[in-house]
Every structure is written in structure tokens, then in C-alpha cells.
Amino acid sequence: MTLAIRQFPCLGDNYGFLIRDEETGQVASIDSPDAEAILAELDASGWGRLDFIFNTHWHPDHAGGNARLKAETGCFIIGPEEVRRIAPLDQPVADGDQVRLGDTSFYILDAGGHTLGHVAWWSRRAEVVFVGDCLFAMGCGRMFEGTPDQFWASLERLAALPPDTTAYCAHEYSEANARFALSVDPSRAVAERAEVIFAQRAQGLATVPTTIGLEQATNPFLRAPLLRPDLDPAQAFAALRVAKDNFVG
């Protein structure tokens, strides 16, 4: 693999990600949830540098460490324009743009819906996508700023990636997501995956990353049109999102 990835927990339920292009040694942090934790992981990695921050959206648990990391490492910050609402940003990007980490290219995908300008970072060569809060294992982010049509289009965009693409989600929400999925989707695949997730969490293991193919098979939000065939796809998604927002279980 041309891309080395270090995943580590931070804050209450976030994951941080440091990535390194193996050919050139360039290093980036995907978002900046916790500057102190990122600097500690950077030191433990032995990689010796932080060249970039690649932001997915503006929320403080994703861009809150930008200023400190830039001050301490001189890194260059790239992300959607909305990041400027709370943090420094050197280069704005949007859907269709391409960014290089050394010899590894990342394509910017519109992932709006959780926030209006949310983006995902996809490397075809490395077969990975960093999805922020748009997509979770068996779930998706809350629809804080977008519309059902926008959010559904973002999920479709991610679902259209190759099934073996590894998807790195930004939070450990899988156990709660699995409980909700069981309440709305009777498929055997969902039941089997939920059992795996419950066992992983009982052992304190991470359920991230996932794959696009696994989400296509077991994520109720990607399966919304199948679960609510009485509604058009965006409205089916919206109905599930409202149900999840009010779910207790």
C-alpha cells in the first residue's frame, strides 16, 4: 500500500488519522479533533513532520486543532471554505478538486448534508476514503445544515465508490447505529453484522474502518429505498434520519 495510516482515539468518541505517503514521506492529519493527541501520535510515529491538515468540515471536533497544529508544525491546511468559520484555512477545496500528498492523489467529493460544505477525501490509488461525519459504520451523521436531497446525493456518491474501498469514519458510533439498524432492517446481514459489532465493542475494539461494500449491505441509510419503497429515495432517507434522531434503544 502506498499510504500508511495511523488511527487513534481522541476526545470522547472521535478517531484521529495520520497518513503518510510512503514514496515521499509527506504526512497529513485528517481533520484536527485534538491537537495534543495528534502531536503525541505524530511523535510516536517517528514520521518527524506534519505537512498538511485535510479537513472534512467546520465542526470544532474536526477543525478545532487547526491553529495549534499550524503554529507548532507549519503545516498547510486544506479543506472546504466553511472551515474559516472557526479555524485557519490555507486552501479551500470543493467537489471535483484534486489534492496531492506526495505521490498519492486525493479526489474531493461533495459530502454535504451534515454541514453544507462537508467533503470526503478519496484516494483511488490507495483505495481509501475519509468520510468525516457523512457516513458511519451502519449509520450517517445528523442532518444539521443540509436537506434530505443533498444528504441522500452525498450518500449515493459514496456508495458508488468501489465496494472494496476502505472507509474511515470519524466517530465510534457503531454500537448505537447497530441497535437502530436492527429496529428497522430485518435482513440477516444486518443481524450478523450487529452481532460482530457488539462483540468488538465488548472487547474494547474499534469498529472503524469499514468498507463501502459492507455499508451497502448493512447500513440502513444506504438501504433507505429498500426499507421504505413507498417513498422516493431522498424522502425514504429523511424518514430514517428522523427515526434515528428520536430512537431510544
Image: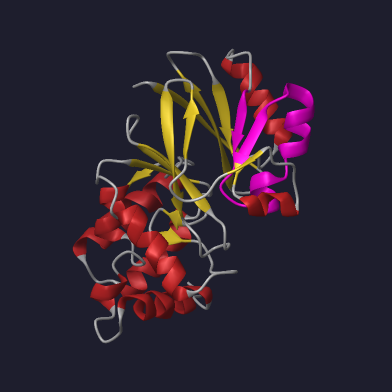
Residue 105 occupies quadrant: top left
Q: Is residue 232 above or below residue 136?
A: below
Give the colouring mode of the picture. Answer: secondary structure
Q: Is residue 132 visible?
A: no
Q: Residue 190's x, y, as percent?
A: 27, 61
Query: Residue visible at 42% across and 21% down?
Result: 103
Query: Residue visible at 41% across and 65% down?
Result: 179
- Is 68 on the left or on the right of 131, as rendered? right
Q: Is residue 38 visible?
A: yes
Point out the residue furthest to the bottom here.
Answer: 230
98 or 225, nearer to the observer: 98
162 or 41, nearer to the observer: 162
Query: Residue visible at 44% across and 54% down?
Result: 136
Query: Range of the magenta residues?
Result: 51-78
Q: Is residue 116 above or below residue 52?
A: below
Query: Residue visible at 34% across and 22% down?
Result: 1
Q: Residue 57's x, y, as percent?
A: 60, 51
- Count of numbered labels shown in the rendering: 0
Residue 49 occupies quadrant: top right
- Is 19 on the left or on the right of 215, as rendered? right
- Is 74 on the left or on the right of 125, as rendered? right
Residue 228 occupies quadrant: bottom left
Tell me if residue 231 is in the magenta stretch. no
Q: Is residue 26 above or below residue 206?
A: above
Q: Residue 39's x, y, as percent?
A: 69, 26
Tell me if residue 59 is in the magenta stretch. yes
Q: Is residue 19 above or below residue 16?
A: above
63 or 5, nearer to the observer: 63
Q: Residue 45's x, y, as percent?
A: 57, 17
